[in-house]
Amino acid sequence: MKTAKTRKYYALIALITLGLLTVNLVSAQEFKLNDNASTLKVLGTSNLHDWHLQGEQKSGEITFEDLGKCAIKTCDFKVKSEALLSGKKAMDKNTFKALKTDEYKNITFNLVKVDNVLEKGANKYLVKGHGDLTITGVTQRIPIEFNVDINQGKIILEGTKKIKMTDYNVDPPTALFGAITTGDELTIEFKNIYQ
């Protein structure tokens, strides 16, 4: 026959075990961005030719309220402004000047609200929501949609988004004393891998 003291002991053990399981479950639903495996491209136009920048030095995190239902709790992303590179020194210099990188070191995105999650089967989803994109200290709340693939402890977010530089107080860069001008609209392509 179990004494009251023994029952309290077993209840305490059960509570500790439940607490540890809960901690493990929560931590299993938090994933950090794998910078090396992820890609970020910024595509633009000019009166001479199309151009693109490749984003390096990226970081971020995604957390889920329910991983099995792709119920995203938080999602954030950051890229260092001077890590948006074209491979051409003169163009990079113009990019950094336009982005005012001396003052604004990072470009950030924070998912604020998920409006809809469409299940596509095989742990694939289409997510529509809104988030805050901050460039040169200017924050705009933008609609965004992206595909999510949940695959063996890896979360892949993939999508594209068009924005205008002037919405963020960025003057489209020019070169050769204004002979080369860039278009205002940019297309951002991203494939973020969280693990």
Image: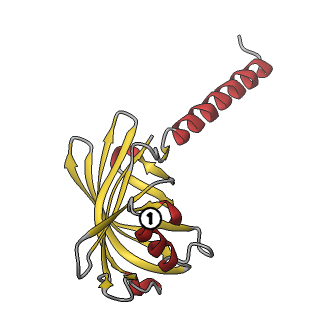
- Choose between 140 and 136: the one closer to the eye: 136
Neighbourhood count class around disc 1 (C-alpha, 10 Å): few under 14, some 14–19, many 20 upward: few
Task: Please determine whether, in this image, residue 68 is positioned above or below residue 110.
Answer: above
Task: Please determine whether, in this image, residue 55 is positioned above or below residue 130.
Answer: above
Q: Residue at x 46, y 54 (%)?
A: 56
- Choose between 134 and 126: the one closer to the eye: 134
Is residue 133 visible to us here? no
Residue hosting label 1:
89
Position in image of residue 62 (x %, y %): 47, 52
Q: Amino acid at mark 1?
A: Lys
Q: Residue at x 31, y 65 (%)?
A: 52
Q: Residue at x 28, y 68 (%)?
A: 51
Say which quarter of the image contains residue 150: top left
Is residue 138 visible to us here? yes
Q: Is residue 104 found left or right of 67 in the rendered image?
A: right
User: Residue extending furthest front?
Assistant: 176
- Choose between 17 and 186: the one closer to the eye: 186
